[in-house]
Image: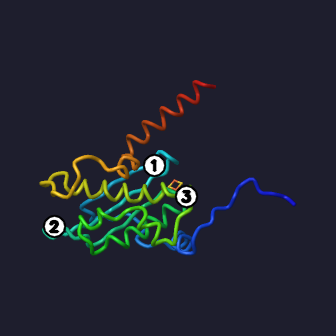
Amino acid sequence: MEMSSRVPLTYSRKVLELFRNPKNLGKMEEANAEAMAGSLACGDMIAIYLKVEDGTERILDAKFESYGCAANIAAASTLTEMVKGKTLEEAWRISWRDISEDLGGLPSVKFHCGVLAVGAMRRAVRAYYKDKPQSEWLPKELTPEERQALEEEKLMEILERRVERIKAEG
Ligand code: FES
């Protein structure tokens, strides 16, 4: 019997459905909060766009672009659905575990794909407050999810350094 060297990932039905037919995919021109972030675990990138109602701080619309794997596309799709209608504070509290649960579970090697989606969303929330007085609930320090979802420049910088090191090692 011939054995494949690659073990297939067991994705839930919902992950596969959203991968094939993602909701909220695409750029949002009228966004007033957005962030692009990448994962050091895999080098994948994601952009999150939010349209926030000033005053109520309620998210009227959310979209994403993903240059990541099936799990990341499904996670971002589900996350953008979840945050619609929520306040920024409520959205902030969504964890990657909530996303994984909503998706019917993610394989453990794909947890970081959900973390990347949450981290990028939190970076977008922070971007919203950049020129505004910060809300009390917003932590001063970056959360672990944000630290794992690195800003594009930072990710590129680290990846380039890695490539140089690999080249130097021959
Ligand atoms: Fe990179 Fe999923 S493997 S986001």
Q: Amino acid at mark 1?
A: Ser
Q: Amino acid at mark 3?
A: Ser
Q: Are marks 2 and 3 in contact (CB under 8 Å)?
A: no
Where does label 1 land, which residue?
39
Where does label 3 land, which residue?
108
Local crowd size for mark 3, using a 10 Å CA cut-off: few (<14), some (14–19), many (≥20): few
Q: Is residue 24 left or right of residue 12?
A: left
Q: Are marks 2 and 1 in contact (CB under 8 Å)?
A: no
Q: Could you say whether the residue bearing mark 2 is in a helix, strand or loop?
A: loop
Mark 2 CB lies closer than 8 A to ligand 1:
no
Q: Residue at x 43, y 55 (%)?
A: 116
Where does label 2 land, which residue?
54
Task: Tell which circle, 2 or 3, labels the residue nearer the N-terminal end.
Answer: 2
Q: Residue at x 27, y 65 (%)?
A: 30
Q: Can you say whether 8 is above or below 86 in the image? A: above
Mark 1 CB lies closer than 8 A to ligand 1:
yes
Q: Is residue 160 left or right of residue 93?
A: right
Give the mark toward the camera: 2 or 3: 3
